[in-house]
Structure formats: structure tokens, C-alpha cells
């Protein structure tokens, strides 16, 4: 079974909790803090395996969850890090964050990998909080929560040349004739339901990869038929080799066929529409082919057209040499623009507050990524930890902002769905 798109939730492992502990040896009076730090939670990593051809291994996985890091222990023993989870995917896999619609990674090259969800760091033990003014801190941190993301994972097959065209124009026959690929060939529409790849080798030792892509129909850019499956894979190709049945074997008009395909490509993506295109005039052994070709050339005099016949194998040498020459001339263009990719550089501006405060049903609701992380890492059963949490809130300016917005003593404040009482 060929699977080329799935959606999945990934949750990296939480960091291990820090430990609150003190030395208790018999002959060591006034033993200091010796609570160790927690271990790092497991990250979720996607890694290319060239032996894979589909995403079928991920099809039935709804959630991938990393393990928690080990908790710290006394005697300054740090918890062990959780082992990262490595998910193997085919080359050409693209990973998109569904919450932001930004591309996290475009995995090309064997063993290429990307961390899609970062494991949480371990919480610090009380030994890490020791200072000159506090030699015996009774405070430690809980582990940091791991990243959670909803992802769309797509396979966009890698090929130098993509054979495109309406169903039954001879794409599979061409691929089978010029490579050792064995696509299914039959005299009915949509014989090709999945992309097929073949390696084409020329007599001058040049080679390239050709893909036979599922046939298009009108409305493909809106997902009709196999449209999106075809167009997704076409985005990867360097050359669009547009196969047209010049013999009009099924009483179709070659001009109409060409306009149908170009219309769907233009609707789907400007980048795809601007790819290098070459017209393959197939079935030139049929009676009406010459006349149809002349009409086509008159309508599109600027198009590069190569005549072939899959039945007689005429024109294949010229076609393959020309495709190889074009590939030698082409330079690789990026598949995505910079604004489509998620940046790992975070800019923080001094005038930008790391939280938001709103009032909902007489409750002050405070939200913010850093604030929520601080909350989840605080041990509220330790008095010193609670005081530290309050100091952090004050340092972030939350108390001042609440007062400015009109919060009064005794008002309810909500952080991560937990209720607190506001005290000036």
C-alpha cells in the first residue's frame, strides 16, 4: 500500500524532576543540599531511511509520545536522560506544523534528521539553588514539559523529470521503455494510482530519475480524482515532461488536453507552473498525429516539442538526450520560500510582553508560554518554591499589569486553569 500523507500528534518526553535532599552522614555536621537534577526527556526525531518508499508505518499511529527523563536523587545523583525516539521516513518527506502551517523540515539525503519535538530539560535539584545567602535551599524544580505538536507528514517523491498528462496518454509505457521500472500498464484510465520511479541511463553514462505520476483530470487542483496526489509529487521534479496523445486515440483534442493540464497546474501553484516544461508528442504512429501536431505547433510556436512513438520506440534517444541536456543546464531552486519555513531564531523585543492578561467572567486569565512553563515546573508543596514563583511573577511585571488593569485584592486569577487569589 502506498501512503503519502498522514497527520500525527507528537509529544516529547517531560524532563525528570529535581530532588530536594540534604547530606545526612553521621560524621558530617551541617550537611548541605545534595539533591540531583532530573534527566532530559526524550525528543522525537524524524530520520531519512532510503530503503523506505511510503509512510505506511506511520498510518496507524495517532500519537507518538516520548518517555520522561529519570528523576534526580540524593547524593547529587543526576537522573538518566530518556532515549530519543527516532521515526524513520522515506527521502523526500516534508513535515509541517498544523498549528502554524510552517514547514519544519524537508528531509532530503540519506540519514538526514530533524528534531520535530524537543524533550523537556530536567528540573534542577536543590543543590543547584545553593547560594552564599542561602546555604540550605528547600527548593527544587519539576521537569520541563516536552514539546507537543500536530504535524502533517507528506511524501513528495524525488525525481528529475516528471511525466505528466491526462490518463491513458502513455506515461507508464514511456517509463517502462526507457528504464527498468515496471509500472502497471493497461488500456483503461487511472491504471497508475501511485507514482512510479525509474532510473534512466544514457549511452554517454549520464543518468537521471524519471517519475510516472498519476493522471490528472479537470478539477485536480481542488482535489478531484488523484489531483492533489499528483500535484504534490510534481512539485519535486525539475522538469515537467508533458505527455500528449497527438494521435487522439480516444477522440480527444490534444489542444484541449494541454489546456486542461496547464489550467490545473496554474491553479495549484505558481512555482509549479513556472517549472521547465517540455512537450512529448506521443503516439505519432497514428494516422491523425501529424495533422494534430501541426495544429498544436501553430497554436504554441514557442513550446519545445519532441515527437515519439511508444509502439515503434521512435524518438526516444532524442528525448532522453534533450532531457539530460536540460538537467545539466538547470540550477536547483528552493522548494519553499523563507516565509514558509519555521525559523529556529527567536527574536525578543523589550517592549513585547511574554504574557497576555484578559478578564473572563470576573476572573483574570493570564497566558504565556514562558509563564506556563514556569508554573508547570514549580513544586507548590514547597514554601520556598511558591515564594520563588511569586517573585518571578513580580519580576515579569504581572502584578503591576494586573493593578494597572484594575485588579483588586481578593480577585481570582487563573494560570493554566488553576485559581489563585490576587494579593497586592
Image (tube, grey):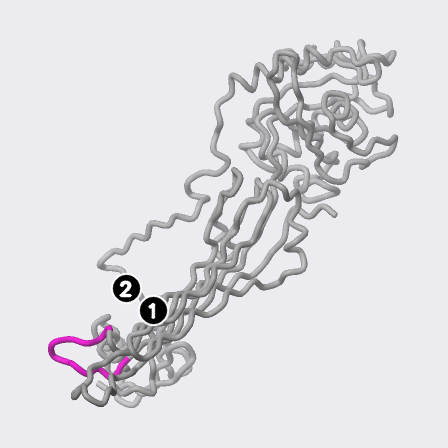
Please give left or right for residue 2 compared with residue 83 in the image.
right
For the stretch drawn in magenta, what is the main secondary structure? loop
What is the quadrant of the C terminus in the image?
A: bottom left
Please give left or right for residue 312 compared with residue 117 in the image.
right
SS for tag 1?
A: strand
Front residue of this view, candidates 45 and 214: 45
Q: Residue at x 29, y 83 (%)?
A: 21
| Mark 1, other Cα within 10 Å: few <14 / some 14–19 / many ≥20 | few
Number of marks in the rendered image: 2
Q: Residue at x 62, y 13 (%)?
A: 322
In x, y percent, where is residue 284?
80, 13
Marks 2 and 1: CB-CB under 8 Å?
yes
Q: Residue at x 21, y 72 (%)?
A: 395
Q: Is residue 152 magenta?
A: no
Task: Give, as a single range, the part of the protein colored magenta.
Answer: 128-139
Q: Is residue 129 magenta?
A: yes
Q: CA distance from mark 2 to mark 1?
A: 7 Å
Front residue of this view, candidates 186 and 274: 186
Q: Which mark is residue 356?
A: 1
In x, y percent, where is residue 46?
52, 51
Amino acid at each position: 500500500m502506498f501512503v503519502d500523507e498522514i497527520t500525527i500528534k507528537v509529544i516529547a518526553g517531560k524532563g525528570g524532576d529535581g530532588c530536594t535532599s540534604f547530606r545526612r552522614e553521621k560524621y558530617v555536621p551541617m550537611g548541605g543540599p545534595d539533591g540531583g537534577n532530573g534527566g532530559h526527556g526524550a525528543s522525537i526525531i524524524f530520520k531519512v531511511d532510503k530503503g523506505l518508499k511510503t509512510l505506511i508505518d506511520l498510518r496507524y499511529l495517532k500519537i507518538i509520545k516520548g518517555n520522561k527523563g529519570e528523576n534526580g536523587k540524593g547524593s547529587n545523583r543526576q537522573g538518566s536522560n530518556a532515549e530519543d525516539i527516532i521515526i524513520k521516513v522515506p527521502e523526500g518527506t516534508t513535515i509541517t506544523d498544523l498549528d502554524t502551517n510552517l514547514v519544519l523540515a524537508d528531509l532530503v539525503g540519506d540519514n538526514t534528521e530533524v528534531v520535530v519535538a524537543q524533550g523537556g530539560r530536567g528540573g534542577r535539584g536543590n543543590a543547584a539553588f545553593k547560594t552564599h545567602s542561602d546555604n540550605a535551599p528547600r527548593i527544587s524544580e519539576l521537569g520541563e514539559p516536552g514539546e507537543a505538536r500536530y504535524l502533517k507528514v507528506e511524501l513528495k517523491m524525488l525525481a528529475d523529470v516528471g511525466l505528466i498528462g491526462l490518463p491513458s496518454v502513455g506515461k507508464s509505457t514511456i517509463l517502462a521503455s526507457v528504464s527498468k521500472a515496471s509500472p502497471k500498464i493497461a488500456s483503461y484510465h487511472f491504471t497508475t494510482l501511485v507514482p512510479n520511479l525509474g532510473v534512466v541511463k544514457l549511452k554517454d553514462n549520464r543518468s537521471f530519475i524519471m517519475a510516472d505520476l498519476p493522471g490528472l483530470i479537470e478539477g485536480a487542483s481542488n482535489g478531484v480524482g488523484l489531483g492533489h496526489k499528483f500535484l504534490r509529487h510534481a512539485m519535486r521534479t525539475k522538469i515537467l515532461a508533458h505527455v500528449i496523445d497527438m494521435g487522439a486515440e480516444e477522440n480527444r483534442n490534444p489542444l484541449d488536453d494541454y489546456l486542461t493540464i496547464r489550467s490545473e497546474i496554474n491553479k495549484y501553484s505558481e512555482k509549479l507552473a513556472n517549472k521547465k516544461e517540455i512537450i512529448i508528442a506521443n503516439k505519432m504512429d497514428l494516422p491523425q498525429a501529424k495533422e494534430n501536431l501541426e495544429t498544436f505547433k501553430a497554436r504554441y510556436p514557442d513550446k519545445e516539442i519532441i515527437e515519439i512513438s511508444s509502439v515503434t520506440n521512435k524518438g526516444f534517444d532524442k528525448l532522453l538526450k534533450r532531457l539530460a541536456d536540460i538537467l545539466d543546464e538547470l540550477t536547483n531552486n528552493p522548494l519553499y520560500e523563507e516565509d514558509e519555513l519555521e525559523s529556529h531564531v527567536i527574536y525578543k523585543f523589550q517592549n513585547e510582553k511574554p504574557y497576555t492578561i484578559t478578564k473572563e467572567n470576573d476572573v483574570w486569565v493570564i497566558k504565556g508560554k514562558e509563564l506556563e512553563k514556569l508554573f508547570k515546573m514549580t513544586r507548590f508543596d514547597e514554601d520556598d518554591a511558591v515564594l520563588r514563583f511569586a517573585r518571578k511573577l513580580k519580576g515579569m511585571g504581572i502584578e503591576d499589569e494586573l493593578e494597572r488593569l484594575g485588579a483588586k485584592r481578593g480577585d481570582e486569577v487563573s494560570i493554566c486553569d488553576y485559581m489563585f487569589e490576587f494579593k497586592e
